[in-house]
Amino acid sequence: MKRRFDTYFPWLFITSDFLVSLISLSIANVFLQLTGVFEGGSFSAYLPLSLLWLLISSLRKDYRIGRTDEYDHTIRNLIATLLWFLGVTAILWTPLQNGNFRWIQIAGLGVTMIFLMGSFRVLVHLFLRHYRAKGNNYRNAVIVGKGGTSPRLADVFRIRKDFGINFLGYFDDEADCNQTRGGITDFFGEAPKLDLDFIYIQEQLDPSLVKKVIDFADENYIKVKMIPGGSLQLEKNLSFSKYGDFFVINVNEIPLDNPLNSLAKRTFDLVFASLVTIFILSWLIPLVGILIKLESRGPVFFIQKRNGVNNNVFNCLKFRSMTPNDYADTKQATKNDPRVTRIGSFLRNSSLDEMPQFLNVLMGDMSIVGPRPHTIPMNETFKTQIKRYNSRHKIRPGITGLAQVRGFRGEIENTHQIRSRVRLDYFYINNWSFFLDMGIMVKTIHELIFNRENAY
């Protein structure tokens, strides 16, 4: 079943996708009727919509699920297809033309489709991985040149059976192990007998030999991939920039350098922070302000200088939870800290003291999710102690973050805690996705309800 599966799978996927879309639309129809925002349609009315879905999905080639793709790639493809589908449906589908709740109807279709179709697509992805892990639908591969990072790639093939890549061995003049099939010159005589799909070239191979291997692969319709050196085996995907006919690798580019990603994150921040401001802060600030004033003299807000994106300093807002003191910037709050007021203790324990930072989000100083900002004195200390500490300032700081939902919140008592925070911040910055943000927000709510140990 090396290649035959690839012949049949697109047709199986498209047929199944069409049937699931029809079921999803029927369920959406029932749901919208029950809520009273849609009069409903017959089965014959939804058949053209499923055919439209089939057309868009096929044109976008959603059936191409790469053997090394992760689940988020499958979901991103689904979302793009769904946006096209909803856009065309809103324009062309007759039952939506005269409705009083048109946008609610479209949103209802979208929510139902993303849930049901998303579940289906992820199940297909899981099936493919399981099928390949069992030794089916595989691809034959060799590595030309043993050394550098090529053994790590061989380990990946051995461990990740779900990639479906059958590693046949090395061709190298110096390596002598049970996986070495011969010298590099032997490669050109042996390769035609191996039914190869991929050739991986070790990065230190002589350029003239690299060109010879690529020319051979072109003549024999085999895909060639270069293995980057150890310095480029980073914790993220690499991208390339083209200067005329010259290519360079963007070594430290991050997902939020992409304008669309940045726009999506900022748009979500503005919408979410606006809703919080209108429906919560509008009454919470006066109420908490009165309680703070009744207990102690001083301002309602505690305004503290903190480092933000690109290390720029901004005024971070919090409800004042301590009596005014000279050590607020240099001394962290500790358990049973005598500076904390009674109302302040409640605010800190419930994390309500952080709520004014949604105003910082609206002003563009912060994001909903991101690395937590530290005080300027703490930054000055940590950047001399922690490697890559300043890399956490590549993006806007957040009200919550990956480190906080992994248990590293509150007082920093030792270097292990700050190192762990920085490591998680670095991972978040280099692997940002909208779904990662949503997951962190859900986990934040869980932490606020069930884990208050370090909130003081």
Image (tube, rainbow, N blue to C red):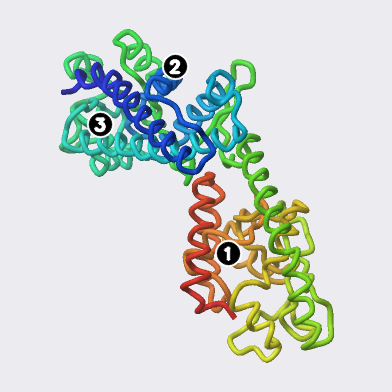
What residue type is disc 1 on?
Answer: Ile
Tag nearer the camera, 2 or 1: 2
| Residue drawn at point x = 84 percent, y = 86 percent | 297
What residue type is disc 3 on?
Answer: Ile
Q: Which quarter of the picture shows residue 377?
A: bottom right
Residue 29, x across and y down, in percent: 43, 34
Q: Which quarter of the picture shows residue 346?
A: bottom right
- The outermost residue toward the top is 219
How far separated are the C-alphas under marks 3 and 2? 27 Å
Q: Evaluate whether residue 128 shows in this view.
A: yes
Residue 21, x across and y down, in percent: 38, 28
Q: Which residue is mark 1?
A: 386
Q: Evaluate whether residue 229 shows in this view.
A: no
Which numbered disc flags the more N-terminal residue, 3 or 1? 3
220 is higher (above) or lower (below) than 200: above
Q: Which residue is mark 3?
A: 165
Which numbered disc flags the more N-terminal residue, 3 or 2? 2
Q: Secondary structure at mark 2?
A: helix
Is disc 2 in contact with disc 1, using a CB cutoff of under 8 Å? no
349 is higher (above) or lower (below) than 58: below
Q: Which residue is mark 2?
A: 59
| Residue drawn at point x = 56 percent, y = 50 percent | 429
The residue lying toward the viewer, choosing from 283 and 29, is 29
Is disc 3 in contact with disc 2, using a CB cutoff of under 8 Å? no
Q: Which quarter of the picture shows residue 325?
A: bottom right
Which numbered disc flags the more N-terminal residue, 2 or 1? 2
